[in-house]
Amino acid sequence: MKKSILVLGLVTGIFTSSVYAQSKAIKAINQTKEAIAYVVNIDPIDVVAGYVTKQKDVVTEFYAANELKLETSYPTVDSGARKTDTTEIKVGKTRIVVIGEPKIEKIYMEKDSTGDFDADKLSNKNSDDDNKKHEGGLEFSIGYNGLLENGSTSLSPANQGLNLVNGKSTNVNLTYNHYFNIYKENVRVSVGLGLDWNNYRLAGDSTLTPNAPKFTMFQELDGNGQAINFTKNKLLARYATLPVMLHFQTNENKSGKTVGVSGGVELGYLINGRMKQVSELRGKTKVNDSFNLKELRYGFMGRVHYGNVGIYGKYYPQSAFNSNEGPDLNTFCVGLTFGINE
């Protein structure tokens, strides 16, 4: 009798503990469903709760990082003799499909026409975004290089020897820019290091005087006293540059491109100057000299871009030559930039 009572008590205890544990488990599951439903802002149905339990970190982080609109739909799929409820969750271009309710039969994820879904890429999205907070890139610019006197490209008679050949006076720039995000990738600051070439293709046959206390030009003569005609007559100024720019750009469009506008300043240090001439009489000649060019300069720069191609402009408000050593002429540049880091 005592043994029977002991066994009955043991069974009752096990049953009571089992019911209590089951009650706790059901309560915990319900709380989890409610929490998940709150995070993703959808109805707390079992099929979504079951899926989001496994993927909530990926989905919520992807949603928060990209400020994407979360859309849900509940179509019904006719599966032979019975109908199966299907849940679709759209996060940007990603579609999460859950077949079966309340019993989950299948879960899969897909993208639109952009390609197959890559779970690893999605799960690493935030780490990729973190890397983009500090990123850099090499940019190449080429354009037209000109001189201004009192805001005009028409030079005074005293400076006619510096008239330029339009289309052959070029500005070439190669810069590595490092970007720092201020607000996501919509507002950024960049700091760069680069090389800038100002090619002044002279229209006349004047020769610049090297090692002179002041900028001077003269006309070279051949043995018969005739002026030497140059097929190429160019002054080159090469600078090391330090550009600092503020960038504003839109989010990517359907083509993955952004539209942006940038502005900033550029500091430059003269590395060297060179006079390059080509004539029938003397062939090709090169003379390295500063030719009284300003050693330190600053300028303003701006650009607009679509994707990684843009239009840039630069203006240097101070003279290209040292004060009291040469003409008061300003440099400006207009052209195209390639390799812009979006």
Image (cartoon, rainbow, N blue to C red):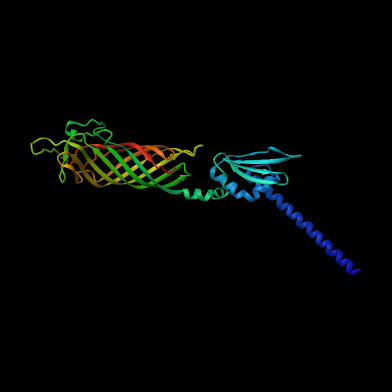
> Looking at the image, which residue is at 67% across and 44% down?
98
Q: Is 174 left or right of 60, judged from the image as shown?
A: left
- Towards the viewer: 174 or 2: 174
Q: Position of residue 9 (x, y in %)?
A: 85, 64
Q: Is 8 left or right of 251, judged from the image as shown?
A: right
> In the figure, residue 209 lies in which quadrant?
top left
Q: Quadrant of the N terminus?
A: bottom right
Q: Is 251 left or right of 77, judged from the image as shown?
A: left
- Towards the viewer: 286 or 39: 286
Q: Position of residue 35 (x, y in %)?
A: 66, 48
Q: Position of residue 210 (x, y in %)?
A: 16, 45
- Towards the viewer: 318 or 172: 172
Residue, far right: 1
Q: Quadrant of the C terminus?
A: top left
Whether residue 176 is visible here, answered yes or no, is: yes
Q: Position of residue 171 (x, y in %)?
A: 30, 40
Whether residue 92 is visible here, answered yes or no, is: no
> Looking at the image, which residue is at 64% across and 51% down?
54
- Towards the viewer: 236 or 233: 233
Q: Is 77 left or right of 291, judged from the image as shown?
A: right
> In the figure, residue 335 lies in which quadrant?
top left
Residue, far left: 224
Q: How many discs mark residues in the rendered view? A: 0
> In the figure, residue 324 lies in which quadrant?
top left
